[in-house]
Amino acid sequence: MLFHSSIRRELARSFGATLIVLVTVVMTMTLIRTLGQASRGSFNPSDVMMVMGYTVLAYMPTILTMSLFIAIVGTLSRMYRDSEMAIWFCAGKGLSGFLGPLLRFAWPVLVVVLVLAFFVLPWSNRQIEDMKDNYEKRGDLERIEPGQFQESAGGNRVFFVEKDVSSDRVGSNVFIATKENGKETVTSARSGRVQAVGPDKFLMLSNGQRLESLIGKPDIKISEFGEYSTKIGSSDAGAKDAVATNTRTTLYLLQNPSRANLAELSWRIGLALAAMNFVLLAIGSSSVNPRVGRSGNLVFSMFAFVVYFNLLNLGQNWIASGQVSFGLFLVALHGGVFGLGLLWLAQRHNNWDWRLVRRRARSRTQEVAT
């Protein structure tokens, strides 16, 4: 049918162009932020592209929802401006008749948003947290870079190795500064090698000197050694004690309905419900006067999008703090927006004039009074 095919064809072009632009913008912003985090030691610099990919994947439900919303608003606004809507209205197609082609186009996007929010989002967050945790828990040996001062995982030791001799397990001109148990020690050696003893790793120093002093006291103990060993790490980095809520699977959140889990679950369900509600809101907010520019219409649409997603974040915090219940928030926010969207669509479809309705009600009141 010409009516359905023409609308879906234009929606596809607009949606594809908007999606490419938004993904490019998000990738650029994510790359800048990830590079900053890598420079501060939060991520391995070699994992920057992977972290960026997982982060963009976590943002995809929001990106797809925004792209769909902008595509519908832009397409219908263009049809209003070029008087195509007037032609369809004269042909007997009311505004509610656009729900059919819009939903036929939007349902695959809505399904993808649902799958991303429920399954892919926690998986991508988990991958990011694992890479961050593994890099933070790497042993002191992995932190050592020739020619650079490196701090240990606990922050109580500083290492320096001038250069490698033959491999990554042997170095020359080793320097170690330690501050623990109320003591400060400075150890230097001509060479050092890594030796594994069971699950632990030791740095074996040769031909060096050790300075030891108590913090706050002037006494210094100096000793020389032919060989000295210090523990620098373990082969087991250890398991992560706490798991972030946003990395939990949706099934786990359902089986363990704590406040934090319900707050995260409300965010994931909200992403799917918001995508459906935005289809209704886009139809109602796309009406534009052909004699007036459509910039104001687009600004209002983007403002509604920002407000809706801010309410999602706010509601997540309220549920986590116990200020509002999980079910009440979902019904109040998403049910309220759905009802507002239907009312708005009915007003546009029937061309209701609220001022005229108020005047009629006022006149009827006056007639009854007289």
Image (cartoon, helix red, strand yellow):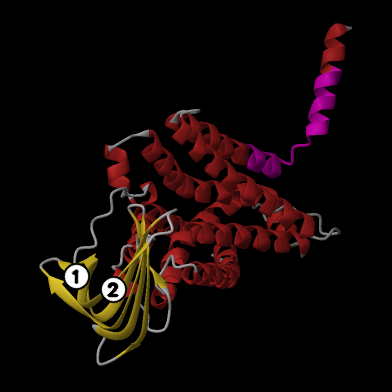
* Residue 29 left/right relative to 224: right
Q: Position of residue 151 (x, y in %)?
A: 40, 68
Q: Nearer the viewer, residue 329 or 206?
A: 206
Q: Position of residue 24 (x, y in %)?
A: 56, 73
Q: Amino acid at mark 1?
A: Lys
Q: Nearer the viewer, residue 292 or 163?
A: 163
- Which residue is labeled 1 in the image? 201
Picture layout, residue 61 above or below residue 139? above
Give the number of callouts.
Answer: 2
Q: Quadrant of residue 356?
A: top right
Residue drawn at x 57%, y 47% as measured from the top left: 309
Q: Is disc 2 surrounded by few (<14), some (14 to 19) or many (20+) residues within 10 Å? A: many
Pointers 2 and 1 in contact (C-beta within 8 Å) = yes
* Residue 368 left/right relative to 62: right
Tell me if I can see residue 88 in this picture.
Answer: yes
Of the residues under marks 2 and 1, which one precedes in the sequence?
2
Q: In terms of secondary structure, where does tag 1 sit? A: strand
Q: Is disc 1 surrounded by few (<14), some (14 to 19) or many (20+) residues within 10 Å? A: many
Per the rendered image, the range of residues in magenta is 343-363
Residue drawn at x 56%, y 51% as measured from the top left: 279
User: Quick check: is 342 in the magenta stretch?
Assistant: no
- Which residue is labeled 2 in the image? 141
User: Quick check: is 357 in the magenta stretch?
Assistant: yes
* Residue 39 left/right relative to 257: right
Residue reaching furthest to the front = 219
Q: Report the quarter where the N terminus lies.
A: bottom right
Picture layout, residue 336 above or below residue 143? above
Q: Quadrant of residue 256?
A: top left
Q: Nearer the viewer, residue 249 or 202?
A: 202
Q: Main secondary structure of the magenta part?
A: helix
Q: Report the quarter where the C terminus lies.
A: top right
Q: Position of residue 368 (x, y in %)?
A: 83, 9
